[in-house]
Amino acid sequence: MSGQLSVGLNCPSCGGAISVSEGESSLNCRYCGSTLYIEGDNGVNTVAFKNKLDRDAAIKATKAWWRKGFKARDLKSAGAITEVYPIYLPFWSIGTRVAGWVCGYEEKTTTDSKGNTRTEREYKEEMVLMDLSFSEIACDPGDLGIRSLRNFNGEASFEDMDMIPSFESTTSRDDAMAHARADAMARGRASARIPNITFESLHVLVRKLSMIYYPVWVARYTYQDRMYIATVDGVTGQMLSGRAPGDPLYQSLAVTAGTSLGGLAAAGGIIAAFTFQSEIGIAGVILGLIVLGGTYWFFRHGSEIIEGDFADRKQLASLKKGQLGSLLGGARI
Amino acid sequence: MKVTLVKCPKCELPLYMETQDEFFYCSHCGTIHTRNGPKVERIPYEIADFRPDAQTDNRVYVPFWRLHTDFRIKSRDVKGGFFNKIGQALKGGDKGASIYIYVPASQMETAAFRYWSVNLTINNPRYSARTDFAGTPRMPATTTRDEAIELADFVAVTLEAEKPGTLQYLDYTLTVNEAKVVYLPFMSSRSGLHLAV
């Protein structure tokens, strides 16, 4: 988290301007020396980042994004931006410390020169002690494709909040803290890298909790009579999320190259497995199936390029991890 | 957000602390309190004196939560550590004990947190108490009592896990009887903090 974040407030004793870092709850007035306590609404400190972009910069960032990746090649000439506007999105920003122990074992199978296999347990005990950051959008982001905050650095100011519309916070502090705790618990457990857990004692402490209003530029544009969206970070100018048309040529090339390479690898693998009874053959078959699966995925979904935390993109991510096998005729990956 | 002037809950005088600290110390009456929204809680504390030969430069007081606990072990499973097991069996078993657990109340890097919490819990510091800080700077406190109790559980399991053998299972209870803040004297140097009791 950043220590650079500050918010304009006044000392109740001398009226002097004071600033407080994100998540801090006490400070001393630099003018009169009074010790002050910062109390947020319902115990939550709220800050807003200053918007650093203008309309032209947001359009420029969107058009630069059009030229990257496997998007339609004529997007830069045929795409037409219909509206660009800034909004403030609320995010929960939570710092946690996870401390504890995870114990268990890992099974390792070895094969000796005579072909005998033996499985041994390697017992493990791992300490978990780490500081983590968690962020989560505090409203329904609709079709914006933004769910968490990536940047925590920036100048804070409430000046723009009067001019730029902001989404109301609709999620509860308790829910956000529960999600942050679950995230810290999962990351702490994963850091131990113990496949079979027999004992676990993990504690999650919430170190700081803030509500951050973050400026985002939304650009809506058309391409061949279809509407698309892109969002630009109002502090860094980086693209946050977006949908863009894919290119049929890239899809065709991918299908041609993918099926050829995948077919060759799988066929070569089958021949090697039956002829030489080699494990390399099995690896070749698996590699071929993976290439074919990837080719199918690109053909199926390459008509639209999606970046960011869109709900349908998440489905694809989980598909890649766990369900790709079903596309390959039941093979387990 | 609301900004309020911090006043001592005992003598009602406004505080003028030199450092930013969530343990609010009243230099007039010596009361330390914490705030959580409108809730104000007084903190019982002790100040340990520096050892007589400690240098006067680079002195700092570091706050620790000292928790008097009953750590009772119902059962455990440890793989390996044969000689340790034999030793414990000869002593009649290790079923836990009443222990003072020290938890740093300041924000520390994870390695320093582990080092000081484990070492001070194993070797409780002996010190003579004093009534004020005598102008010695204090490290700001950030850890609440409830957080300290959670972390005490971590320290207790650490004591078990760091014994010989590989811990596989531990069934235990940890009861906190008393929680008090102890300001321990340290010398600060480039190599880190050095206890000066």
Image (cartoon, coloured by chain):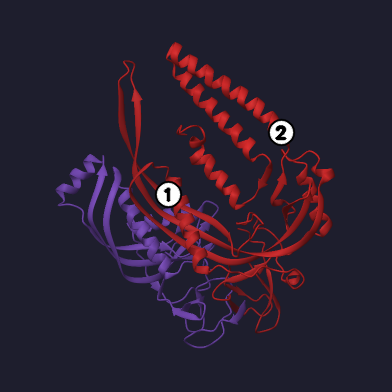
Chain colours: A red, B purple
Question: Is B57 rendered above or below residue A79?
Answer: below
Residue linked to disc 1: A189
Question: Is A16 rendered above or below residue A194?
Answer: below
Labelled disc at residue A250:
2
Residue in the foreground of this view, choosing between A155 and A119: A119
Question: Distance of mark 1 from mark 2, alpha carbons?
Answer: 41 Å
Q: Earlier in the sequence, mark 1 or mark 2?
A: 1
Q: Tell which tag, 1 or 2, sits nearer the viewer.
A: 2
Q: Label 2's element? A: helix
Amino acid type, label 1: Arg
Amino acid type, label 2: Tyr
Question: Is B43 rendered above or below residue B160?
Answer: below
Question: Is A103 rendered above or below residue A92?
Answer: above
Q: Residue at x 52, y 88 (%)?
A: B12
- Coordinates of residue A85 in the picture (x, y in percent): 77, 62
Q: Residue at x 65, y 84 (%)?
A: A13
Q: Residue at x 85, y 44 (%)?
A: A77
Q: Label 1's element? A: helix
Chain under numbered label 1 = A
Left or right? Give the position of A219 relative to A106. right
